[in-house]
């Protein structure tokens, strides 16, 4: 299925990563902000599953393969940290959150909050540049499709929450908490790997 139908294998992977996230949230408890009080093992698990899938579509010697995976892991950690920080200051609530926000200059707070708009397209762009660095010739058309998909997935996920009358509400924070947004993002980045394969 991986070789003959890469889109299907990517779809299955995307759903699986989303389910792992949701299962962890449900395991710890859905109520309130419990889900932000612990590190989600679903993040490294999902990332490693994606790298495993992606490795089947790149032809590199062992040294370069180790290097590209190491760079991808470092990039993933940077994106995670920046994204988590931006989301925290966008949705900070309660007395502690209010105090932290008040201690930061307004210009810096706005910069952190609006950085979310730059981080999202940088997720597929970073993957594109890593592939380019190792001369794997990623397809620029698929980069554009990937960026558009990852941006559109946000309002689409919120709409799905509203239509399904999902518990907790229908907004960006619940699209992440529910795990509905995650398959869209995994699929969007995975399109770059499929595009590279198609071009070659």
Image: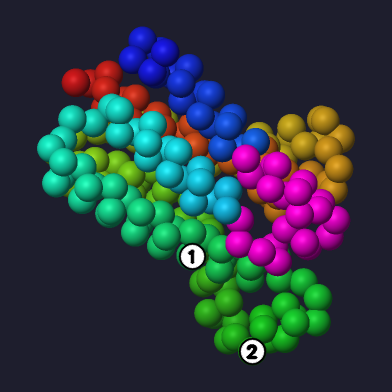
Label 2 sits on a secondary structure element that is loop
Label 1 sits on a secondary structure element that is helix
Q: Which residue is mark 1?
A: 81
Q: Does the residue at mark 1 contact the one at mark 2 (Cβ under 8 Å)?
A: no
Q: Mark 1: give few (<14), some (14-19) or many (20+) Cα within 10 Å.
A: few
Q: Position of residue 66 (x, y in %)?
A: 22, 47
Q: Is residue 164 left or right of residue 185?
A: right
Q: Residue at x 60, y 82 (%)?
A: 106
- Given residues 151 and 188, the one toward you in this image is 188
Q: Who comes first in sequence, dot 1 or dot 2?
A: 1
Q: Position of residue 45 (x, y in %)?
A: 51, 46
The N terminus is located in which quarter? Answer: top left
Q: Mark 2: give few (<14), some (14-19) or many (20+) Cα within 10 Å.
A: few
Asked if residue 28 lies in the magenta stretch, the reply is: yes
Q: Position of residue 169 (x, y in %)?
A: 83, 46
Q: Position of residue 162 (x, y in %)?
A: 81, 36
Query: Quick one: which residue is furthest to the top in this view?
Result: 4
Number of numbered labels in the structure image? 2
Circle nearer the viewer, 1 or 2:
1
Asked if residue 73 lies in the magenta stretch, the reply is: no
For the record, the magenta segment spans 20-40
Q: Residue at x 62, y 40 (%)?
A: 20
- Work out how far the residue at label 1 is from the one at label 2, CA to CA, in angstroms: 20 Å
Q: Is residue 183 left or right of residue 130?
A: right
Colour scheme shown: rainbow
Q: Residue at x 64, y 44 (%)?
A: 21
Q: Is residue 131 above or below residue 70?
A: above
Residue 58 occupies quadrant? top left
- Residue 155 in sight in this render: no
Q: Which residue is mark 2?
A: 103
Q: Is residue 2 left or right of residue 153?
A: left
């Amino acid at each position: 299925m991986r070789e003959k139908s890469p889109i299907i294998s990517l779809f299955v992977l995307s759903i699986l990563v989303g389910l792992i996230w949701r299962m962890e949230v449900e395991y710890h408890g859905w109520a309130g902000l419990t889900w932000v009080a612990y590190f989600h093992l679903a993040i490294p698990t999902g990332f490693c599953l994606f790298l495993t899938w992606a490795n089947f579509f790149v032809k590199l010697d062992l040294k370069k393969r180790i290097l590209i995976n190491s760079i991808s892991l470092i990039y993933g950690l940077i994106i995670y940290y920046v994204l988590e920080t931006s989301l925290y200051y966008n949705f900070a609530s309660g007395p502690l959150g209010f105090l932290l926000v008040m201690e930061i200059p307004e210009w810096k707070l706005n910069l952190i909050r609006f950085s979310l708009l730059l981080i999202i397209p940088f997720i597929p762009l970073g993957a594109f540049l890593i592939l380019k660095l190792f001369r794997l010739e990623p397809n620029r058309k698929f980069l554009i499709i990937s960026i558009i998909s990852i941006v559109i997935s946000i309002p689409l996920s919120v709409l799905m929450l509203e239509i399904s009358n999902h518990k907790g509400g229908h907004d960006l924070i619940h699209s992440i908490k529910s795990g509905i947004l995650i398959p869209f993002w995994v699929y969007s980045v995975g399109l770059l790997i499929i595009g590279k394969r198609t071009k070659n």
